[in-house]
Image: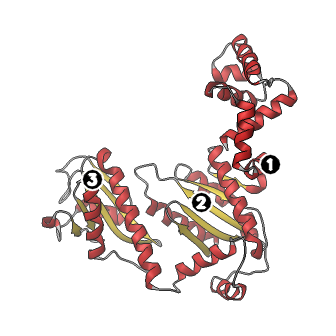
Amino acid sequence: MITAVSKALAQQIVNTVHDICGRDINFINKKGIIFASTDECRIGTFHEIGKEAADTLKTIEVTENENYKGTNCGVNIPVTHNGLFLAVIGISGHPDDVRSFARLAERITRLLIREQELGGTAHSLSEKKRFLLNSLTSEHLEMPEYIFSVLRDFYIEESTPKRIIIIRLIAEDSSVTLSSLETKITRFFERLGITLFCDYYPDKFIALADAQTVRKNMDAFKNFSSENSAHLQIGIGCEADIWQLNASFRSAHTALANAALDSTSLSLFDDLTLEIILSSVPENNRNEYLAKVLSGLSAEDILLLHTYYEEGQSLNRTCERLFLHKNTLQYKLNRIHRICGFDPRDFKDAVILYLAVRMQEY
């Protein structure tokens, strides 16, 4: 397992990113010493904020040049891999101007480290995890005898039902990095005794867990997703036999898609109803349905329908949410009826329109 970024690799990364953005970039070790930089004069010097970022594993942005020793205005992002500190990447410039380039350098580093790790040891622990998850979630299971032997390495009992869990990372907040989220997720799974999980570049974690473990720890999942709702979403698939986990894998994707649609941080497949049908409709059929039902309607019309049905077709509540007079709302509903031919207030037509609104969101 790789636990450090080599000087050669770090120098390669800083030069590559520098060619893109023209900014000075540093790689800083745990002691705060710059060991690779686009500015050769800074190699071997102390970087105060880099040391603090390494100690706290938090991104630190600096807006003034003279406040810290050996530090210029810029962004400093700590990078971890498999929960271990690798380096701090510092990029010079106003944070608003260079933040995206710092994240680019972080992503490049993580990707190259993974490539080195996979190339270095053919049977490493991380590769075994990836092989197991890829095999168990595939349409056709191959090499069952070997899979059975590898399962024992992770203390996984094949006779009990399982669930697939997918976590999507959302690192939009400048104070949160993919590395720090990776560390949080790793510790969370380890706390629950989930041993088989793997990150999938660039923004997903996939895990296999005993169904009983998930049931017993649903409160922990809810708390974890709530605490990190701004940075990740979790989809939990249906229960399945370990040799039929492709079904759980597909349903976990459905749950994750629902989490994104409903702007929630946790979605359990068992709680879904209509979403199961919507997720199974082929794209070409979905497009034909939408063209037939919503043709001629504007984005404003569709937003009105969405709100109207979300409020249980209550005129009063819809008017309150959209700041409309009741007569204006009635006029708009009549106009929608004239345009598309479906009356939003008629039960059968309302079902058709509601399905179209939800399908468009999907």
Quadrant holding the N terminus: bottom left
Report the disc number at residue 21: 3
Disc 3 residue crowd, few under 14, some 14–19, many 20+, Cα 10 Å: few
Disc 1 residue crowd, few under 14, some 14–19, many 20+, Cα 10 Å: few
Residue 102 is at least partly visible in this image: yes
Label 1, secondary structure: give it.
loop
Corner quadrant of residue 110? bottom left
Earlier residue among tags 3 and 1:
3
Indicate the amino acid at tag 1. Answer: Thr
Indicate the amino acid at tag 3. Answer: Cys
Asked whether the residues under the numbered discs 2 and 3 touch, taking CB atoms below 8 Å apart as contact, a structural biologist would say no
Label 2, secondary structure: give it.
strand
User: Is 232 rendered above or below residue 134?
Assistant: above
Asked whether the residues under the numbered discs 3 and 1 touch, taking CB atoms below 8 Å apart as contact, a structural biologist would say no
Residue 37 locus on image (x, y percent) = 21, 65
Residue 160 locus on image (x, y percent) = 78, 76
Earlier residue among tags 1 and 2:
2
Q: Residue at x 36, y 51 (%)?
A: 100
Report the disc number at residue 167: 2
